[in-house]
Image (tube, helix red, strand yellow):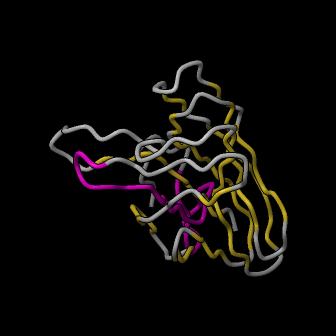
């Protein structure tokens, strides 16, 4: 099924002819007017992916911010809100095989209440089942709303995404 309309990116599934077999979108999704959580300093920390927004063909299993994927070829993109006065970076980590699969660009904010949204992407092949974590590293901590500042928009809030395109 070609869900993106243009025909340039389609999802073939079962011989449908698209560039990708399937797609899944995971997020850090919270209720309206809810802070995103505390940023921990100077250690790699799991980013709280907590919601499956879309998973057309059940290509992943999300459990406690860990994503399990089957063997295959994947293209991923990710970003996350980080509100700290420090350099920050994201990585997608294969914790089963102790490998980093993808990196973000580095973010930096000059004031403690300035947000930054490091973003990254990567392409990789998994030879077998692997458990992945989106992780962040920050040079400073920020309590309560370091992972996103509550706003009363009348809608739920999303502070970060991981999108996974399965190629084969």
Q: Viewed as shown, does residue 52 lie left or right of 33?
A: right
- Give the quadrant of residue 65: bottom right
Question: Dominant secondary structure of the magenta stretch?
Answer: loop
Query: Which sits in the foreground, 16 or 107?
Result: 107
Q: Is residue 161 above or below residue 126?
A: above
Which residues are the magenta region? 10-34
Residue 116, given in percent of the width and then of the height, sits at 54, 30
Q: Is residue 57 above or below residue 6?
A: below
Q: Is residue 4 magenta?
A: no
Q: Is residue 21 magenta?
A: yes
- Disc count in the image? 0
Q: Residue at x 43, y 45 (%)?
A: 159
Q: Is residue 75 above or below residue 152?
A: below
Question: The C terminus lies in which quarter of the figure?
Answer: bottom right
Residue 150, given in percent of the width and then of the height, sits at 30, 41
Q: Is residue 148 above or below residue 116?
A: below
Query: Which sits in the foreground, 18 or 143?
Result: 143
Query: Which sits in the foreground, 10 or 86?
Result: 86
Q: Residue at x 65, y 64 (%)?
A: 133
State the residue lying farthest toward the left: 154
Question: The N terminus lies in which quarter of the figure?
Answer: bottom left
Query: Which sits in the foreground, 63 or 126?
Result: 63
Residue 79, given in percent of the width and then of the height, sits at 56, 43
Q: Residue at x 55, y 54 (%)?
A: 163
State the residue lying farthest toward the top: 110
Q: Residue at x 65, y 57 (%)?
A: 45
Q: Viewed as shown, does residue 119 lie left or right of 128?
A: left
Q: Viewed as shown, does residue 80 lie left or right of 37?
A: right
């Amino acid at each position: 099924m070609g869900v993106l309309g243009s025909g340039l990116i389609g999802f073939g599934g079962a011989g449908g002819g698209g560039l990708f077999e399937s797609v899944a979108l995971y997020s850090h999704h919270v209720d309206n007017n809810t802070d995103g959580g505390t940023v921990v300093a100077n250690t790699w920390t799991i980013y709280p992916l907590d919601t499956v927004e879309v998973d057309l063909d059940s290509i992943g299993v999300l459990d406690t911010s860990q994503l399990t994927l089957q063997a295959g070829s994947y293209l991923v993109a990710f970003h996350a809100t980080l509100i700290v006065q420090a350099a920050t970076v994201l990585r997608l980590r294969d914790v089963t095989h102790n490998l980093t699969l993808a990196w973000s660009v580095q973010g930096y904010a000059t004031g403690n209440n300035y947000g930054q949204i490091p973003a990254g992407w990567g392409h990789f092949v998994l030879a077998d089942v692997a458990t992945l974590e989106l992780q962040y590293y920050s040079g400073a901590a920020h309590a309560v709303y370091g992972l996103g500042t509550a706003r009363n928009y009348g809608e739920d809030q999303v502070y970060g995404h991981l999108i996974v395109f399965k190629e084969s």
